[in-house]
Amino acid sequence: MIFIGLFIILAIVLIAPFSVKKIEEELEIFLFVIGCIAVTITSQWSVSLIKEALVEPIKITLAVFIAGFLFRILQKPIARSVNKIADATGIRLFAFLVIITLGLLSSVITAIVSALVLVEIVTHLTLERKNEIPLVILACFSIGFGAALTPIGEPFSTIAISKLKGMPYQADFLFLFRHLGVFIIPGVILFGLLGAILMPGKRQKAHGLTGGKDESIRDISMRTVKVYFFVMALIFLGQGFKPIVETYVTKITHQGLYWLNMLSAVVDNATLAAAEIDPSMSLLQIKSALLGLLIAGGMLIPGNIPNIICAGKLKIKSSEWARLGVPLGLSVMAGYFFLLMFIK
């Protein structure tokens, strides 16, 4: 009965955010409630779990809060400098630098703030919409990759480290950097090169995508609170699904986990990481699962936080995103699959 209940909960987590608009808007509260239910039906409540859920989100929450205020201070200088830098470097080199810089910085300033900086850059960049959309998508792939290098980059990496901090991996701050950096950093550079190739030779004098109103202190504070509860919810969710993971997921081959995680295209990769990753898995299984989640997470808008932020603020449609995101994601998935055979 417990397993039946958990599979029903899993189905709800996968389907409800796309079926009910209110759930999509209040995803953090929804996952928090679902996580509590999962822990309850598996009788896993404990003082240590509650302590972990209260303490673990603090680092990324503080990073989001501090970086959010720094971005607010630098917002206007960024806006004033965008076209000057683009003119000085040329639009292709500018796109390359934006994509790799935001990708690598996202592990420090968080994926959320990197996405907001990207929105600000694109808002003030005078390119046609058809040229700005590929820049946004490639930059979001890059940000999603780069943010996974540290546990303060985004909830995905926070949860992965939280799940693996005990024996046998004893994951520390640089655990993901050590084991995934060889895949992630070349990926960020690849997205930068693709951005340079897809940009027009000259910058047009056009007004493409625009990002709406400036961030207020209230916006920063509300986002910080949401991130805290989101990570807390994922900790409960991960603990609740532990029986399924130990019984079924750990028995899937690393190749199977890699391709299974194409689900990340439609379900936030942090949610799937919370439901999948377990210290009883082999290191190759963990790396394959995480890479599958990272790559597929860029394919469609719901896959990760940067996509959601940028598409929402810049009014990019799902069909526009999928036109480049899906073939790009599938190509990168295929390439990394063969790479995993040689770099283990």
Image: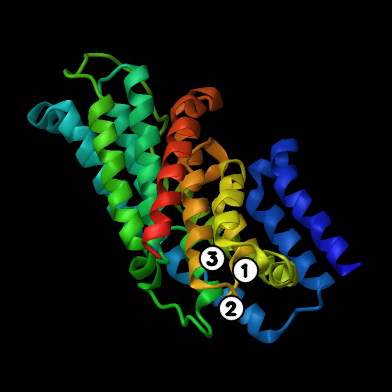
Picture quadrant of residue 328: top left
Label 1 neighbourhood size at 10 Å, few (<14), some (14-19), many (20+)?
many
Instruction: Give the percent coordinates (x, y) of residue 263.
Output: 61, 46
328 left or right of 34 in image: left
Callout 1 secondary element:
helix
Report the residue marked by disc 2. Answer: 52
Mark 2 residue type:
Glu
Q: CA distance from mark 2 to mark 1?
A: 8 Å
92 left or right of 132 in image: left
Q: Is residue 214 above or below residue 320?
A: below
Q: CA distance from mark 3 to mark 2?
A: 25 Å
Q: Are marks 2 and 1 in contact (CB under 8 Å)?
A: yes
Q: Which mark is residue 285?
A: 3
Q: Earlier in the sequence, mark 2 or mark 1?
A: 2
Q: CA distance from mark 1 to mark 3?
A: 20 Å
Instruction: Give the percent coordinates (x, y) of residue 205.
Output: 22, 14
Callout 3 secondary element:
helix
Report the residue marked by disc 1. Answer: 235
Q: Earlier in the sequence, mark 3 or mark 2?
A: 2
Q: Is residue 72 above or below residue 136?
A: below
Residue under the image location 38 percent in, 53 percent down? 339
Callout 2 secondary element:
helix
Give the residue at the far right of this rendering.
1
Which of the two discs, 1 and 3, sits closer to the camera? 3
